[in-house]
Image (tube, rainbow, N blue to C red):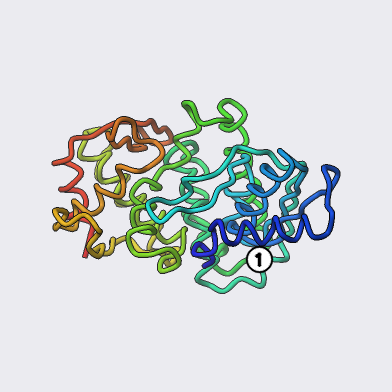
Amino acid sequence: DGEEHKTWQTLNLVFDALLENACDRQTVLFALGGGVVGDITGFAAAAFMRGVPFVQVPTTLLAQVDSSVGGKTAINHPLGKNMIGAFYQPLLVVCDLRTLETLPKRELSAGLAEVIKYGPIADMVFFDWIEANIEALLAARPEALAYAVKRSCEIKAWIVGQDERESGLRAVLNFGHTFGHAIEAGMGYGQWLHGEAVACGMVMAARLSERLGLIDEGLVQRLERLIEAAGLPVTGPRLPPTRTAEVTSNADRYLAWMRVDKKATGGEIRFVVIDRPGSASVQTAPDALVRQVIDSCCE
């Protein structure tokens, strides 16, 4: 995973190349690669000369179904994931499914996390389809992947079309990401693939939804079984100590990372929860309840 390369240093390499080659405002940047390449290229395009065009050509499943669509660009900071960036739309997104034939199994599974995400928050019919076709997806069968990419992009485009800058509805696309980003940052960028962390984060978010009385145990179990069937983790790691000496428990380490999440306001963590099958919202939850969820979901 290239998350450790989403830094100012890498971004400056792009700027160096653009300036050394006398590029101008008519220059078009192409992001050929996975989500990390897309994030860096998009942010460089947004910032260089206050904005030049760019085209997304995602080559991983995760990038094709999620990160290349919607205009989010960013780099990481040691204190939080995707904390520095811009909303900047590409001219075009080109998804060539043949590139998915080159993916290692681990990367394909990681991409399926973002496909699975769309079911509980927006479309349970799609969730049913994923359950029925998970083996075909893992086998990278073209027909199954084509539908998964198409439907995922349709759902995301519909949501982003109503809330491009994430002032409301778009936040539900972060289902599993509050817990997931804590795992990525807390374990060190690159130790867990983004999709792996999101998969585990979705289990935690679903468990939180259940404890808030919003959904029943049956939906949580379906989600866990599907995530496991996709070859993804359902149990969270124990995070190593942070620089904050008083943060000693694993749950408190998660909470410390989640308080710098972009959805947090005034230090209060806001979670994307399933409020009913196929629908989600953003809510707060008592720290004590969140600790219970973390303790029950971690090794």
The percent coordinates of residue 173 (x first, y second) are 48, 40
The percent coordinates of residue 269 (x first, y second) are 29, 37
Depicted 219 relative to depicted 100: above or below: above
Q: Quadrant of residue 53?
A: top right
Q: Depth check: 8 or 281 in front?
A: 8
**Residue 139 appearing in the image:** yes
Q: Depth check: 100 or 28 in front?
A: 28
Q: Quadrant of residue 263?
A: top left
Count how many numbered circles sit on residues in the image: 1
The percent coordinates of residue 280 (x first, y second) are 40, 33
**Pointer 1: what residue?**
100
**Residue 225 appearing in the image:** no
What residue sits 49% from the left and 43% below the top?
118
Q: Within 10 Å of the Cα at label 1, are there few (<14), some (14-19), or many (20+) other Cα atoms? A: many
Q: Secondary structure at mark 1?
A: helix
What residue sits 35% from the left and 32% below the top?
276
Left-right relation of 55 to 290? right
What residue sits 43% from the left and 67% below the top?
231
Left-right relation of 215 to 68? left
Q: Depth check: 190 or 150 in front?
A: 190
Quadrant position of the C terminus in the picture: bottom left
Q: Quadrant of residue 208?
A: top left
- The amino acid beneath tag 1 is Leu
Left-right relation of 82 to 79? right
Depicted 38 relative to depicted 124: above or below: below
The percent coordinates of residue 15 (x first, y second) are 70, 55
What residue sits 61% from the left and 71% below the top?
103
Depicted 3 relative to depicted 50: above or below: below
